[in-house]
Image (spheres, rainbow, N blue to C red):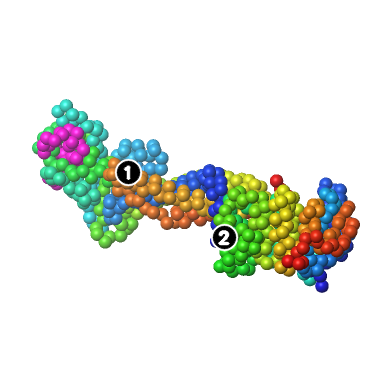
Amino acid sequence: MNLTSTIKTSIRALRANWGRSLLTILGIVIGVMAIVLVISLGQGAQNLILSQVQSIGANTIILRPGRQPTQPSDAASTLLTDSLKQRDVDALLKPINVPDLEAADPAVLVPGSVSYQNSVYQATVLGWTPNALGEVFHVYPEQGAFFTQDDVRSYAKVIVIGSKVKQELFGESDALGQFVTVHGQKLQVVGILPAKGQVTAFNIDDIGLIPYTTAQKTLLGIDYFHEIFLRAKPGANVDQVAADVTTTLREMHNITDPAKDDFFVVTQKTIVATVSTVTQVLTIFLVAIASISLMVGGIGIMNIMLVSVTERTQEIGLRKALGATNRNILLQFMIEAIMLTFAGGLLGTLIAITISALVSTIAQTYFALDWPFTLPIGAIVLGVGVSTAIGMIFGLYPARKAAAKDPIEALRFE
Amino acid sequence: MALIQLENITKDYISEGTVTSVLHGISFSIQEGEFVSIMGPSGSGKSTLLHILGLLDRQTTGSYFFDQHDISTLSDEQRAQIRNQSIGFVFQAFHLLKRTTVLENVILPLYYSSVPKKEYIQKATAALEHVELSHRLNHMPSQLSGGERQRVAIARALVNDPKVIFADEPTGNLDSKTGATVMNTIEKLHLQGKTIIVITHETAAADYANRIITIADGLVASDKEVRSPHTHYSK
């Protein structure tokens, strides 16, 4: 008994009922498609997030007030906590406290809108230091320049705006040197940023950058920061710097119990770890759900194979009379079941890859997201492998039933 | 030793606790090259006997030697191998595979044999030539007449060059004219030295045999040499 002729026989049997065969493998197709798609998209999304996280730079440390958010209300407390102030920045910048710290750029979030004449735009207005955007995200104004250290010291009423803000407020006309209104204060536009889209947490195109001192004193009347961007010196051990920062701030704030920290430190490493954990857990969860449909598909295969065995009782009897052993019959029906599920797995994988490629193309073309299309070899192997295994598992019972048929009864079967 | 040797064969069926006895002790032997007709009314047990002779079923008691093998000692696998190599079956209902060409139907027994794959087509073509169906190789069974279908089945029985061909009511589904053609084809095989065992209740078919065993109520009622009215010995 050779394999090629068995496969040929199976193909003929499957083709004879091709409509039924197609419907039978639908469950497998959907199951495998779901699994491969989840893994492929999950990997793409993770790569996208990670590449954005990496754009912060490995030596960037973000310092936030409040507690590490684990639930939505924590995010609010981060914005409302006033624990980070200028004296913290000053202390951190002392080499005796944090020897490997290069820069500390405090940030203040200004809620509200930017308006010019009759146009109003909901921009993200951020009080920051002159060079932070350039040094952290490598984005520099297309027209004009960043405000200066002097502007920070003098509470200068100046603003650098993103391309979308400029477009919404000024259209095609020149914006440099014009005055926009934020929180009732007139700020002069000194720089316009190039179109960059989403970078990590915020959209550069939607941004308005002003000196952090202006944001604090002139606009909001507060003395604390919402965030401090710290930069370690090149080649420094970022974890060590983060530890030094934590120690310094605990001293400044008189905190002995780490559980009572009123600030927290985020590094690229911790973000990467969090993102990876989240996407991995999510992927496993979704794959587990998709596996249920594979299971259902497998039961469908078993069902239709049982029908096929009954329909072909005479053929089984004849083959046995002509010298087929039980093993030959078992193998024939097993191969048929495996071919069904293998075809289903292949089809599902192809559909999933197509959708995945489509999603990444759409994300790149229409949403300017750097969503990479990844061909997850592991997912393909898993999808096709699992579907083949499903064929083996759910094909075994019908095949054994076929092999156990009594040739006399089978030949007599009408 | 005879090709087939039966000693006191009995067969009981047990269904739902009651035992039905079909064969009560059958003994005979058949030499290689014989053409035997097994006759008997329906219910006499002749089909059961054929199934035992053809190694499709096992006797309840008694001994059966086929080609010097004690059948009762063989495993299912060994019996399948003997069926494949030494026995050809021709059934009343032809039992050809649908949607499968004539040629591939005839190749079927070769799949389960040790014949090298490259000889499949040549052997099957030769067998089909034998039954004068060379022009039908790539036809489907549904395109053939009843007589042609039965001749394809004969070619399939022949393809592994078996020692014996069992034919179970080979003309039962055919009119008398095509039945005669089929019987002539079978007779031709006998003339070439094959052992033929035909189960039939039609005397027209039995007339080709040179020995007629009659079964009645599970026992051999008569066993006699006959001179076939067909003139095949002079051919």
As drawn, the label of residue A5 is 2
The amino acid type of the residue labelled 1 equals Ile
Give the residue pinned by disc 1. A362
Q: State whether residue B200 appears in this view.
A: no
Chain ID of residue with mark 1 = A
Other residues around mark 1 within 10 Å, as few (<14) / some (14–19) / many (≥20): some
Chain ID of residue with mark 2 = A
Residue A148 painted magenta: yes
Q: Quadrant of residue B35?
A: bottom right
The residue under the point 61% across, 65% down is B126
Range of residues picked out in magenta: A147-176
The residue under the point 83% across, 63% down is B227
Foreground pick, A40 / B176: B176
Foreground pick, A10 / A264: A10
Picture coordinates of residue A20, whole percent (x, y): 55, 44
Q: How far apart, in angstroms, are the residues tagged by discs 2 and 1?
A: 45 Å
Picture coordinates of residue A149, whole percent (x, y): 14, 46
The residue under the point 82% across, 66% down is B30
Residue A71 painted magenta: no
Dot placed on the residue nearer the N-terminal end, 2 or 1: 2
The residue under the point 45% across, 50% down is A349
Q: Is residue A97 left or right of residue A386?
A: left
As drawn, the label of residue B229 is none
- Which quadrant is the N terminus of chain B positioned in? bottom right
